[in-house]
Image (cartoon, coloured by chain):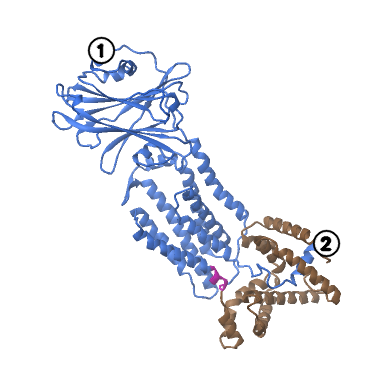
Chain colours: A brown, B blue
Amino acid sequence: MDYSELVAALRERRPDAMERFQTAFTPLLRYIIAPILPDERDQEECLSDVLLQAWDAIGGFDPGRASLTTWLTRIARNAALNRRRSNTRRREDGVLDEAAPDAADGPEQSLIKAEDARALWDAVGRLGKGDRELFLRKYYYYQATAQIAAELGMTVRAVEGKLYRIRKRLQTALGGVYHG
Amino acid sequence: MDEFDKLLYRGANQMPPELPGQEPPKPWKKPMGRVCRGLALISITLNFLGLDIILPAVGTVLLWLGLRSLRRENGGFRFAYACATMYAVLRLTVAVLRATPLDLRLAALVGQEWYTTAGPVPLYYALRTVALQSVLTLAVAGLWQGLKAVFRRAGQRPRTAAAGGLAILEFLLIPMALIGLEGWLLVGPILLIWILLVWSLRKLSRSLDKAGYALTPAPVRCSGGLAFGLWLGIPLLAVAVLPLCFARLPVNDDTPVSGPGVRDEALYHELLDLGFPEDLLSKLGDNRMALLQGAYGLDQQGYIQGSGRHPDGMPEVMVFEVPVRDDKYGFRTIYLAYLYWRPEEHGGYMEAIQVTPDVQGVTVHTSCPQGELEWRDDGGVLHTAPLTFSFRSDGSGIISYYADFSLPEEADGPVEGWVYWEAAPTFPEKVALFNYSLRFAHRLTPWQYPYTLPSDFLAANALSPSWRTFHWSSEGQLAPEGSYDPDAY
């Protein structure tokens, strides 16, 4: 779908642009945020943050690199993860969010992890279309197995089985590269 | 969550933006795609390579799978899913029934005919078409209402004209099928509209992304692949296997015939004098010979070639025309067809004989033919089975009589048959000439779908590589004693 006119309207700060933008993308943003933030109040706050971020950052959006939906999805996902992370840290007995970057990482450690991540995504890129979708739903969009199963018309058991096989393939593909 | 899981989640933070498939999941895309593909395949009719069976079956399953995912969303989708389930069950039932003789029996049970512009069809078939199309129409109507509800819930104007148009078009197909409307001038534009509507419906899933994006997906107990395999596999298995169970017709083997009764010697010699071949006369039997009482002429047509001919499943035929004196009409003619299947012709599965006693249907009164098959088992015991004829008239009112049967598998040697009928004068002409015909059908293969009796095949004047037909016709003569001259025609 071509959103170039909408992007132009947002960049020019036209009066109706934000309303059109919200109408077009709020359902998608809710869909992305909901699996990461189970609490409804968190979801609403996060949604407002994302809309504001998108409004502020639309000037930097490059349609040559990613589609508008992908760009927005990324913003929404990161915003939701940040909120989840801070929620976790606020909890007294909080467990460290595994998705959170390690604040203690030095430059060398960060470089190693970036290389590992590249190797992982190379391996993910080599997966078949269906497997890649399953992987992304699970590890990128944080969707619950039950949601994935229902949306794809599969049983939970079948999704678990497929994810297990995908993980095995990735482990094999990565060999001992991943340092953790 | 194990260590590797944690690593995968962490790695996702640094995902490059250009990774294929990184577009967000579209929950509506798959179910709506299945629904549209299902509707398209249900309506496609390609009569080759079994695609007329496979494509609608695949379409039915896809429609069901698509609606299964949507059924939790709202009442409209739930209704559509229920209708799609009923449609799939109906289609499955029809597919199974069509593989068996039960379908023909049901058609006979309902009995009446429905007249379309293309000709009469059994009422049962018309009712079946109406039932299937009605349920499909209801499913599409449910889909339409379900989609409308999605837009309304999102506070948006429903953009569901395609679904509504499709529901109306599916409904219009019911009277069209009942009337039997054909021809590209009518069907062409409707097909075009239909394709556009399905295409628009397919594009609708993009609009649905703006109307809530997420759907309330229904959990499933059976994965799509397995459900697809089962829904598709059962009818296809039924279509593949069931016809083999009904490849042959039962042989109504009567008790072995006891020895010959008391022969009418006078009649026997009269017929010999008239030129009846002695070898066949001795096989004729007392009952059949009694029909020829009062014979005053004989004409013999056809041939018995015996061995040396390439087997084609067809009997060799010899027809005797025997005019006899009659108290009521003064005279009438007995037709007696002797059929001979050589042992190497037994390999078929179903046979039919069609007797049309008067091809023009204007000259003579005819009786329903009767007949018997006779054969000997490996112990030399003679067996007999009656041939049961039933009649039906063609579009021009000509009556033909049909008998369906299978040749006995236990026959050791040739199978012989006798078919006989009478012709009596309608008008007071001295001599009436008319044409009569015998047609034979022989099914070469054990598998057929849908289940078709050979008589139906003959009546439809159909052609198929699985069948062989043979047509034998001749001119008959009704003439009083003294005027009968078989050489006159």
Give the residue displayed 80% in from the left and 75% down from the top. A89
Q: Amino acid at mark 1?
A: His
Q: Which of the pair B251/B144 is nearer the observer?
A: B251
Residue to which mark 2 is pinned:
A176
Residue B485, picture quadrant? top left
Number of numbered discs overlaid on the protein picture: 2
Main SS of residues in magenta: helix
The residue range painted magenta reads B205-211
At label 2, the amino acid type is Gly
The 10 Å Cα crowd at callout 1, few under 14, some 14 to 19, many 20 or more, is some
- Residue B106 in view (yes/no): yes
| Dot 2 alpha-carbon crowd within 10 angstroms: few under 14, some 14 to 19, many 20 or more | few
Q: Position of residue A55 (x, y in %)?
A: 64, 84
Subunit of label 1: B
Local SS, label 2: loop
Q: Position of residue B281 (x, y in %)?
A: 31, 17
Query: Which residue lies at the image location 46% right of the left edge and 29% below the top edge?
Result: B347
Q: Is residue A43 above or below residue B87?
A: below
Quadrant of the frame with the N terminus of chain B:
bottom right
In the image, B254 versus B421, the foreground residue is B421
Which residue does the numbered mark 1 point to in the structure image?
A: B269
Q: Is residue A20 in view from this perspective?
A: no
